[in-house]
Amino acid sequence: MEYVQNAAAGTAPLTPLRPCATHTLHYRCKLLVVGGGSGGCTIAAKFARRLQKDAVIVLEPSDVHYYQPLWTLVAAGVTSVASTRRSARSVLPSQARWLRDSASSVDPARQAVVTTNGTSSTMNTS
Ligand SMILES: Cc1cc2nc3c(=O)[nH]c(=O)nc-3n(C[C@H](O)[C@H](O)[C@H](O)COP(=O)(O)OP(=O)(O)OC[C@H]3O[C@@H](n4cnc5c(N)ncnc54)[C@H](O)[C@@H]3O)c2cc1C
């Protein structure tokens, strides 16, 4: 209460703002795949077979993968939505590193992608 009264009177001591704690993680890779959908899984698997473990990074925020081409058959009543669903881990190549995060910006000149998910990560493919 005293602080509020002092603040109102303009005599409250100034408290310095504490800097916000953020973490920046840097990952290096040979190939960065943004999105672990059917296209991303396919290209990641193709390169992960040829490159060292974790040389391929897949940036995919969802832990659920949907095989969308089957959705036409779902609409036709031939199959269920559940049959199109897999865990992302089960469809992403084990040789690749999965970062459960979203790309927020791409910097082609630096070959870097910045992600946002509480922390920010920068990946450099050079
Ligand atoms: C009803 C329907 C029927 C279809 N039928 C066929 C068919 O018969 N044959 C066929 O070849 N194709 C078909 N398609 C097209 C098919 O969906 C695409 O060929 C295929 O899914 C595209 O794969 P993709 O990886 O490019 O995109 P998606 O499978 O959509 O995957 C995109 C991924 O990117 C992720 N993502 C989004 N934003 C970000 C971000 N900022 N950072 C990181 N990750 C992000 C998402 O979470 C998602 O996992 C059909 C599509 C629909 C909707």
Image (cartoon, rainbow, N blue to C red):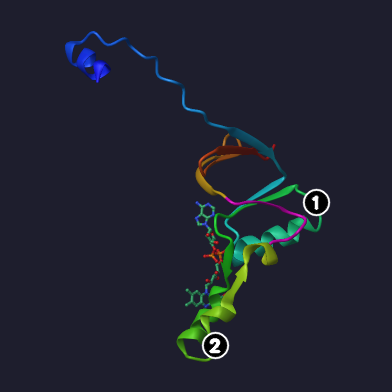
Residue 96 located within the stretch drawn in magenta: yes
> Foreground residue, 19 or 75?
19
> Foreground residue, 9 or 101?
9
Amino acid on which disc 1 is placed: Leu
Question: Which residue has dot 1 on it?
Answer: 51
Amino acid on which disc 2 is placed: Thr
- Main secondary structure found in the magenta portion: loop
Q: Position of residue 14 (x, y in %)?
A: 33, 11
**Gap in Å between the C-alphas at discs 1 and 2?**
37 Å
Figure label count: 2
- Secondary structure beneath disc 1? loop
Q: Mark 1 or 2 closer to N-term? A: 1
Question: Which residue has dot 2 on it?
Answer: 79
Vertical position of residue 32 compared to residue 4: above or below: below
Image quadrant holding the N terminus, namely top left
Q: Position of residue 46 (x, y in %)?
A: 74, 61
- Secondary structure beneath disc 2? loop
Q: Which picture quadrant has residue 110?
A: top right
Per the rendered image, the range of residues in magenta is 92-100
Left or right for 14, reference 94: left
Q: Which picture quadrant has residue 75?
A: bottom left
Image quadrant holding the C terminus, namely top right
Residue at horizontal 51 percent and vertical 28 percent from the top:
21
Residue at horizontal 53 percent and vertical 85 percent from the top:
80
